[in-house]
Image (spheres, grey):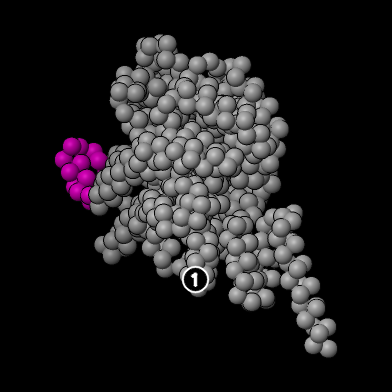
Amino acid sequence: MNPKVKKSADIPSTRLTCGFIFLVTFAVFSGALDNNFVMWDDSAFIYENPFITSLSLENLWTMATTFHYSNWQPLSWLSHAIDYQIFGLHPAGHHLTSVLFHCWNTFWVFLIVREYLSFACKENIDSRILWQSALIAALFFGLHPLRVESVAWVSERKDVLSAFLSFPVFLTYLRYVTAQEAKEKSFWMRTSLLLFFLSLTAKPMPLMLPIILLLLDYYPFARWKTTVDLIPLIREKIPFFALSLGSAIVTIYAQKQIGAMVPLEVLDLSRRIANAVRSLCFIYLEKSLWPMNLVPVYFFPEASKTPWDIAWAPGIIFLIITWLCYKAWKKKKPLYAIAWLYFIITLIPVIGIVQVGQQAAADRYSYFPSLSLSFLLGAGLYATRRFTFMSSKITLEKTAFFSMGAGLVLLSCLTFKQVKVWEESISFWTQIGQNYPKQGAWTYVKRGNALLVRGQVDEAIEQLKAGFNLVEGGDRLPLHFNLGTAYTYKEMYTLAEEEYLKALTISKGFAPGYNALGKLYFLMGKMDLAEENLKKSITLSKKFPLAHINLGELYIAQNRLQLAEDELQIALEQKPTSPNAYDNLGIIYFKRKDYSKAEEYFLKSIDNEKNYFPAFKHLGELYKETGEIEKAETAFRQALEILPDYNNVQTQLDALRNKEISAEHKAN
C-alpha cells in the first residue's frame, strides 16, 4: 500500500476483504446457478459448439484461427472448453465459472480504487475511510443489476473473462509508473502489455485502453503536463495501440463474414449518432444511477422519429455534464473530466457508430466502462471525511456510508430479481416483449421456438397464433414459417403446407421457406415436389448446408447414393462440424456395406456433437449388423441416455439381450 496511508489496526486485511467481497457477490448472483442455457447465442457458443468438446490440438488450433459465429475470441472458447471437460453440458457448472470470474473482478475494482485513491491524495490518508470507500465502490460495481447480463448469460463469459485480464492492467501500469529501476519498469510494462493482449483474445471490449492510459498519465500520474510530454508517452504505448488496431481489424473482418455489420443504407450516420448520444445518457448513464426496466435487448427508436427527436434531450444532458467537467478541470479538479472521458471513450467500440447487430444498446456493454463510475463513488465517499453537519456530532461521512449501505441492499435485491430473467428462454423473451410491446410479434416467435425445443408444440402454436394480432403484411412471415414448423412436428402436414406457402407468398426469395417445404413434401412422400423445393432453396442461398443435407436424405431414401454423397460433402464444405451430415454419410456407407467407413462417419458425427442421438442409434445398428454385440449394446444404451423414451432403440436393445440369453442357454 502507498506509504502515505495512515495504518489502522481496525481494518480487515486484504485477504479477508477479498473473502468478504467474494462471499457477498457470490450470494447475490447465486441464483444464476439454477439458470438454464437460453436460446440467444448459447446454442452456437456452448451446446452446439464442436470446438469446446475436447482440448485436442486440432480444437485448440481451430479456436485460435477461426471466426466461429462471427467472433475471434480464442481465450473465451478455451474457458468454455475447460468447463465442458469438467461439467459437460450441465448449465450450473458453466454459470459457476462466470460468477466466480465476476467475484474476482469485483475484488479487482476494490484494489484499483484503493490504490489509485491513495496515489492521488497528497496528504496523509485515513486507511479506515479509504478501505470503506474502496469496498463500497467495489460492491457498487459488483452488485449492480447492469452486471447481470454479463454474468448470468453464459455466452457472455467473454465479458467477465476480458475484464478479469484488463482490470489488473490498471494495477500493473501503476506499478510501472511508480517503479524506480529500469528493470522493474520493463517488467511491469511487459506484464501490462501481456494482460492487455490476453484480454483482447477474450473480447475486444478494452480496445480503447491505450487512450485511457494516456488519460491516467495526465491525472493522477501527472506525467503529461505539456504537449512536449505527450510524444514520449504515446511512443511508449505504441505496442498497445498496435494490439488495439490489430484486434479492431480482426473483429470487423469477423463480423463482416456473416453480414452482421449494418450498412449505412439501412441505418444512416445521423441516426447512428443520435442513438449513440441517447444510449450514452438515457441507457448507460441513467440505468447506472437508476437501474429499472432493464431489458436483454434495447431496440432503436421508431423510424418515424427524426435524429433530432432522438438526440435533443440526451444531447442537452451530455453538454451539461461535459460543461461541468470542464469547469471542474479549470479549477484544477481533473478527476471528473477524466472519469467522464473514460466512460465515453470505453463505450466508443459499442456505441453504434459502427453498428453490429440489431440492438441499439446492451447492459453488457456497461461492464468495462462502469469502472469510472465506481471510482467516482469511492472518491466521493472518501471526500466526505472532511465534513460534518453544523451543530451536530453526526458526520457527513457516516451519513454517506449508511446511505450507500442501504443503496447496496436495494441494488442486491434488484440484481437477484434480474438474474431470474435469464433463468430460461421463455422468461427471457417475455421480459423483452413486456418492455417492447411493438416488438411483440418477434418475441412471440422466439417464445414459440423455445416451446418447440421443449416439445410443448400445442403451447408453441398458441404463442405463434397470438403474434398475428400484433402485425400485418410482411411482418407475419416468421409467424407463418414457425407455425408451419410447429404443424410439421404435430404431423398436421396440410396445415403446415398452408403456412409455408403463405410465408413464400410474402417473400418469394425466402430460401428457408423452400427448404422447409421441401422437407415437408419429403415427409408426405411427394418426392418430386420435395426435390424441386430443396433445389430452389439451394439456388436462392449460396451457403445453405441444411438444404444440402435434406436433399442428401431425400436421395438416400431413393437409393441414389452417389447424388446423396455429393450433397452431403457440399454440406460439410459449408459447415465442417455438421453431425447430421456425417451421420448421413455413415448411412450411405452402411447401405454400401462398407462398415469401417460407416463407423468412421458415425464416430465423427458424435465427435462434433456428443449428444447426437441418431449417430448412437445408427452406430448400434451397425455393430448389430457386424455381430459386435457388446459394442451394439453400449451404443444403444448411450442413445437411450439421450432419449430414454425412444421405443425403437429399447426394442433393439432388448432383442440383443434376449439373443444373448438364448445363446447362453444353448451353450449350457
- Residue 6 lies left or right of residue 663; in this view the side is left
Task: Identify the residue at horizontal 61%, vertical 16% (top origin).
Answer: 469
Magenta stretch holds residue 224: yes
Judge whether residue 336 can be spotted in this image: no
Residue 97, how many percent across, how many down? 58, 54
- Residue 645 lies left or right of residue 370; in this view the side is right
Q: Nearer the viewer, residue 117 or 324?
A: 324
**Quadrant in the rendering for residue 277:** top left
- Graded by Cα atoms within 10 Å as few (under 14), some (14 to 19) or many (20 or more), the crowding at tag 1 reads few
**Image quarter (top left, top right, bottom left or bottom right) of the C terminus:** bottom right
Residue 408, how many percent across, how many down? 63, 35
The magenta span reads 223-238
Judge whether residue 85 can be spotted in this image: yes
Q: Nearer the viewer, residue 3 or 414?
A: 414
**Quadrant in the rendering for residue 184:** bottom left
Task: Identify the residue at horizontal 51%, vertical 52% (top origin).
Answer: 558
Label 1 belongs to which residue?
Answer: 594
Residue 268, how many percent across, how many down? 31, 21
Magenta stretch secondary structure, dominant:
helix
Q: Nearer the viewer, residue 412 or 582?
A: 582
Q: SS for tag 1?
A: loop
Residue 545, how many percent across, how many down? 43, 47
Task: Identify the residue at horizontal 38%, vertical 25% (top origin).
Answer: 276
Magenta stretch holds residue 20: no
Q: Nearer the viewer, residue 69 or 127?
A: 69
Q: Is residue 520 above or below residue 301?
A: below
Across the whole image, how many numbered discs are drawn on residues? 1
Q: Is residue 412 above or below residue 435?
A: below
- Residue 32 lies left or right of residue 101; in this view the side is right
Task: Identify the residue at horizontal 61%, vertical 45% (top origin).
Answer: 37
Amino acid under label 1?
Asp
- Residue 242 lies left or right of residue 139; in this view the side is left
